[in-house]
């Protein structure tokens, strides 16, 4: 993979991981446009590197929250941090189940099916449209709502369904405060990303060679920096109820993807 292509895909991943437009869907579209002919192992390794970069940017943006959670957990008593951590675990269960028992079926959707990605982007647009019109509240994420949000996260493993868009929209539609919804959405995915990376690396599914170092490093830096900007920006956008703009964007890109798959 060329360095310039790695940087472009890194920026796409960094922006779309947090902005509600589907990072996996845009990576599929980006690979199709750039003509990515990487062998499966190299493509998987690059995906792992980019997800690690965005997970790291999440930790940097929410470093105070992450530090408070760890401090609370090591007090070894029931407190707000322990409760929040258990809600994160609850939210992870649906995605973990899908990843463990339906991994092969899920991977079948990542074969460059641009038309499928287009339809999923339109579904994302619908979710964002309704979430943008939800009333703002002061409600926190509860245990039952955490599990429901986790189901949305599991569905968002499909390319074209935005993970942040689906989880934030679900949270807001459940009546959760928009700022808390964004915070929970971004933090809930970090353990899943590191778990997936550990599984792929320890399972020997990815391998690394020295000639890939430059392109992988360029993609990592691009994804990390873009992720820092997008994560901070997205928190402000959710507060100001600006999700309808992304709904329009997802609708347009979805229609273009469908048109490209049919006539391109």
Image (cartoon, rainbow, N blue to C red):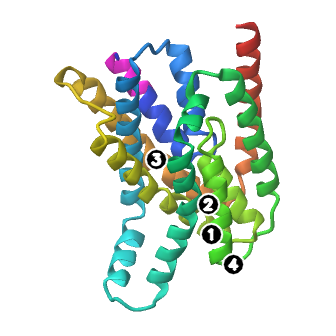
- Of badges 2 and 4, the one in the foreground is 2
Rounded to the nearest angstrom, the CA distance separating label 3 from label 2 is: 25 Å
Q: Pointers 2 and 1 in contact (CB under 8 A)?
A: yes
Furthest residue to the top?
Answer: 264
Earlier sequence position, callout 1 versus callout 4:
4
Asked if the residue at tag 2 contacts the one at tag 3, i.e. Cβ–Cβ closer than 8 Å, the answer is no
Q: Residues within 10 Å of mark 2 (few under 14, many from 20)?
A: many
Location of the N terminus by quadrant is top left
Residue 220, horizontal then vertical, whole percent:
33, 36
The image quadrant that residue 202 belongs to is top left
User: Which quadrant of the figure has residue 105?
Assistant: top right
Magenta-tinted stretch: 2-8
Q: Which mark is residue 229?
A: 3
Distance from disc 1 to disc 4, alpha carbons, whole Å, reads 13 Å
Q: Distance between the Cα atoms at labels 4 and 3? A: 27 Å
Residue that carries the numbered disc 1 in the rendered image:
146
Element carrying mark 1: helix
| Place of residue 127 in the rendered image (x, y in percent of width and height, measured from the top left) | 77, 49
Q: Nearer the viewer, residue 150 or 240?
A: 150
Q: Secondary structure at mark 3?
A: helix
Which dot, 4 or 3, sits closer to the camera? Answer: 4
Secondary structure of the residue carrying tag 4 is: loop
In what element is the residue under mark 2?
helix
Residue 133 horizontal/vertical position (percent): 82, 58
* Residue matched to label 4: 139
Label 1 crowding class (10 Å Cα cut-off): few <14, some 14-19, many 20+?
Answer: many
User: Toward the viewer: 82 or 125?
Assistant: 82
CB-based contact (under 8 Å), mark 4 and mark 3: no
Q: Please give the name of the residue rendered at 38% of the width and 38% of the height, measured from the top-left corner.
A: 48
Nearest to N terminus: mark 3 or mark 2 = 2
**Circle 2 is placed at which residue position?**
150
Does label 4 or label 3 sit earlier along the sequence?
4
């Amino acid at each position: 993979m060329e360095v310039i292509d790695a940087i472009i895909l890194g920026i796409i991943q960094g922006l779309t991981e947090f902005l509600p437009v589907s990072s996996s869907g845009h990576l599929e579209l980006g690979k199709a446009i750039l003509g990515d002919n990487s062998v499966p192992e190299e493509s998987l390794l690059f995906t792992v590197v980019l997800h690690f970069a965005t997970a790291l940017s999440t930790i940097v943006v929410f470093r105070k929250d992450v530090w408070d959670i760890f401090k609370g957990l090591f007090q070894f008593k029931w407190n707000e941090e322990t409760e929040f951590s258990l809600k994160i675990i609850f939210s992870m269960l649906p995605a973990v189940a899908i990843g463990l028992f339906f991994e092969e079926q899920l991977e079948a959707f990542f074969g460059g099916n641009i038309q499928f990605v287009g339809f999923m982007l339109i579904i994302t647009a619908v979710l964002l449209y309704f979430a943008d019109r939800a009333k703002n509240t002061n409600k926190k994420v509860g245990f039952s709502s955490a599990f429901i949000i986790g189901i949305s996260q599991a569905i968002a493993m499909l390319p074209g369904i935005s993970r942040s868009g689906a989880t934030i929209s679900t949270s807001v539609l459940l009546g959760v405060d928009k700022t808390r919804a964004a915070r929970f959405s971004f933090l809930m995915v970090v353990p899943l990303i590191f778990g997936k990376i550990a599984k792929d690396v320890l399972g020997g599914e990815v391998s690394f060679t020295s000639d890939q170092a430059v392109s992988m490093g360029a993609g990592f830096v691009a994804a990390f920096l873009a992720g820092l900007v997008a994560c901070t920006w997205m928190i402000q956008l959710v507060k100001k109820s600006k999700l309808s703009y992304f709904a329009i964007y997802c609708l347009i890109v979805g229609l273009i993807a469908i048109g490209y798959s049919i006539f391109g």
